[in-house]
Image (tube, grey):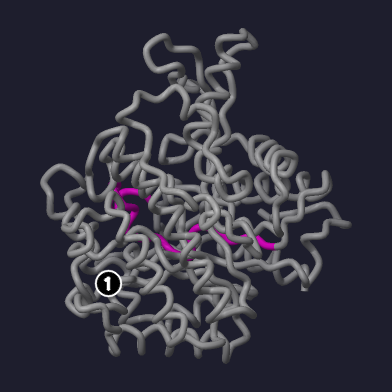
Amino acid sequence: MKIMLPANSKMHSTAFTFGVATASFQIEGAVAARLPCIWDTFCATKGKIRDNSNGEQACEHVKLWREDIDLIESLGVDAYRLSISWPRVMQKDGSLNPQGVQFYTDLLDELIRRGIKPFVTLYHWDLPQHIEDNGGWLNRQTAYQFADYADKITQEFGDRVYSYATFNEPFCSSYLGYEIGVHAPGLAKKAYGRQSAHHLLLAHGLAMKVLQKNSPNSQNGIVLNFTPCYSATDSVADVQAADKADQYFNQWYIKPLFDRCYPDIINDFAAEDVPIIEDGDFDIIAQPIDFLGINFYTRAVYKADTENGFSQVDMAGKPKTDMGWEIYPQAFTDLLTSLHALYPLPPIYITENGAAMDDKLLDGKVDDVDRVKYYAAHLNAVNDAIEQGVNVVGYFAWSLMDNFEWAEGYLKRFGIVYVDYANQQRTLKTSAHAYRDFIRARK
């Protein structure tokens, strides 16, 4: 099965970037060579990870990184999106860890040697545990510690990096980690979710200033995830419910970047849930960005709820991924066109898009036709948005390979490359061949 786009698509242009993406904690292993992070602690807490696993081994990428770059190169992609492990490159006293820095500089140098553009994310959820012990993202000081880490590591990397993202999905760090507690550090309070979100956005703004100074020639921005909100019916109450959900889960993280304020839903909060915002914070948060990274997987449907204002409706009987997420590509087009209408957006990279499927390795092959269909439909959805005037300049498949899927452990497989965790054997799935052939045909 092939991935096809309309013949005149701008995505066929060699100026359009195609890549694959990973995250440090999910693939690296080698925990003894770095400081403990909040996910180590979370994994060690009984009942938090579905299969009781952890990131100690993962895909052993620290050991196998050269073979993994061979794999990336074999796919013919233009770029590789990776994240830096803050606890791998920094020590408790705030100085750099030379061993950790060397790992990444060697990796970056090899990517460059092979003509693969490095897209680096500075934070993909693995906060050093000693910083969490001091309040983590509830502590305003953490934003300044992040800026210091960003300053030191970007100076070390010099001009090796094509693109920097400050954060990956601050929604997940704040809402999942501090508001409902299903991700590390496992705190659960509305006030914590909103305050941590503010400090994450503040840290982004502070780090953007650092990136502008240390790496002015790279593409610098942030990666946000969006789950478009639809109303269950056309009733006024349900439409308002979907709008409130959208403000709460989606606009909360993007509106401050462009409009220097939070969405109107903040006016509905109890006093104790409103985050502490200091004078000048929004001016820091709203630093100019060279690009916006958008991660998309699914949509959500809402109905009115007298208690919370909105509640999600399960889309029973609809096609879903192995995560239980509805497959609804139209939402991708709707998302991109609506954001384009709302904000003065810089160029957009689709920094994550993909699907967990119930993959089976049979006779040395993984025939994941359902994932190929997912990619084909979603690439066409992006193309539809481009044709409507949205400036999308790149697309990254999530993920390069199966890995530690956070609270799901190793039970869910998002990779286009199959990983046998017992022997670390990598096997290209049908989707990897389809993605490679699609990129090759463009070139």
Q: Is residue 300 above or below residue 139?
A: above
Is residue 64 shown left or right of residue 237? Answer: left
The residue where tag 1 is placed is 87
Which residue is depicted at the point 83% across and 52% down? 6
Residue at the location (20% across, 78% down)? Answer: 93
Residue 390 appearing in the image: yes
Q: Position of residue 105 (x, y in %)?
A: 43, 88
Tell whether 24 sits left or right of 242: left
| Three-letter amino acid code at the position of disc 1 | Pro
Disc 1, SS: helix
Q: Quadrant of residue 340?
A: top right
Residues in magenta? 394-412
For the C terminus, which image quadrant?
bottom right
- For this orientation, the residue located farthest to the front is 279
Pick the front one: 103 or 416: 103
Q: Is residue 44 left or right of residue 199?
A: left
In the figure, residue 58 lies in which quadrant?
A: bottom left
Q: Is residue 358 visible?
A: no
Query: Residue at the location (53% across, 31% down)?
Result: 247
| Residue 262 drawn at (x, y percent) | 52, 38
- As drawn, 411 above or below 155: above
